[in-house]
Image: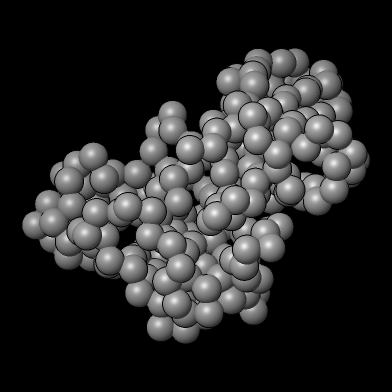
């Protein structure tokens, strides 16, 4: 089935640093979503992208829908301790079932 | 608060027990989903309901039985589970799950299930 390759798997950074993570696929996607999951909670939507090339910000977070429609990235600027969690990319690639496919997640740890 | 609630938040059950998970969404959505999240694996879609009708069963064992009495409520009935079924079970909802795609899914907090 379709897979999303998300990298890096984990990141350990100092407070104040910028963070970048990305998601790639071998197939064309028509929607990209970025979620954050805190321990013991469900994923919370951060940013949704619907058009190739689209660049969207949500506070210190910025995400882009790749021009090729096969990738997306998420940047976090000036990280703070509450940014800790697992970040998931997800996307709809269409096809017969139009399922939402999830990446394997990026664990972010922020050292105060 | 995402507008999707799940109960219970934690559940411990034996392999011979029967229990049910409940999900309720207050967003006016018409599609609801069950996902399983196991350690170090991507979220696995289990079931999709669109306007109360099941539109997707992702080869889920029959010991998991979903029920969707209306567009706001979704249940997952559990019986004779196995220890490997222990996981976080997440419910989500979206406007629709139509083939046009792009319907953003909003997740509940999940039920942490442990099968002994």
Q: Which residue is painted at 17% across and 46% down in the image?
A: B82
Q: Which one is in front, A21 or A36?
A: A21
**Residue that appears at 40% across and 65% down:** B7
Q: Does residue A22 appear left or right of residue B61 in this picture?
A: right
Give the quarter of the image for residue A91: top right
Across and down, in percent, residue A80 comes to 77, 29
Number of marks in the image? 0
Q: Is residue A51 visible?
A: yes
Q: Nearer the viewer, residue A71 or B3?
A: A71
Q: Quadrant of the C terminus of chain A?
A: top right
**Which of the 4 image quadrants contains residue B16?**
bottom left
Q: Is residue A33 left or right of B44 when viewed as pictured?
A: right
Q: Point out residue A110 in the picture as x, y percentages from the top left corner.
A: 69, 22
Q: Residue at x 62, y 58 (%)?
A: B105
| Position in image of residue B13 (x %, y %) | 19, 54
Relative vertical location of residue A85 with respect to residue B71 in this rendering, above or below: above
Farthest residue, direction bottom: B70
Residue A87 in sight here: no
Q: Is residue B62 left or right of residue A100?
A: left
Residue situated furthest front in the rendering: A96
Observer-nearest residue: A83 or B75?
Answer: B75
Residue B64 spot, x, y in % from top left: 26, 60
Q: How is the image coloured?
A: one colour
Residue visible at 68% across and 28% down? A24
Q: Residue furthest left?
A: B16
């Amino acid at each position: 089935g379709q897979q999303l390759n998300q990298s890096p798997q984990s990141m350990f950074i100092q407070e104040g640093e910028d963070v970048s993570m990305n998601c790639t696929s071998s197939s064309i996607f028509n929607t990209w979503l970025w979620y954050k999951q805190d321990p013991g909670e469900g994923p919370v939507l951060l940013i949704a992208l619907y058009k190739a090339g689209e660049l969207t910000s949500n506070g210190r977070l910025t995400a882009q829908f790749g021009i090729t429609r096969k990738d997306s990235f998420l940047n976090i600027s000036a990280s703070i301790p509450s940014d800790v969690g697992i970040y998931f990319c997800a996307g709809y690639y269409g096809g017969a079932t139009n399922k939402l496919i999830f990446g394997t997640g990026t664990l972010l740890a922020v050292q105060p | 608060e995402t507008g999707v609630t799940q109960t219970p938040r934690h559940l411990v059950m034996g392999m011979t027990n029967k229990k049910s998970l409940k999900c309720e969404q207050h967003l006016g959505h018409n599609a609801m989903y069950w996902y399983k999240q196991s350690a170090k694996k991507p979220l696995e879609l289990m079931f999709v309901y669109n306007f109360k009708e099941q539109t997707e069963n992702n080869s889920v064992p029959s010991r998991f039985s979903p029920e969707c009495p209306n567009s706001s409520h979704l249940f997952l009935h559990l019986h004779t589970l196995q220890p490997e079924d222990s996981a976080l079970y997440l419910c989500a909802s979206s406007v629709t799950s139509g083939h046009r795609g792009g319907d953003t899914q909003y997740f509940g907090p999940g039920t942490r299930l442990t099968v002994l």
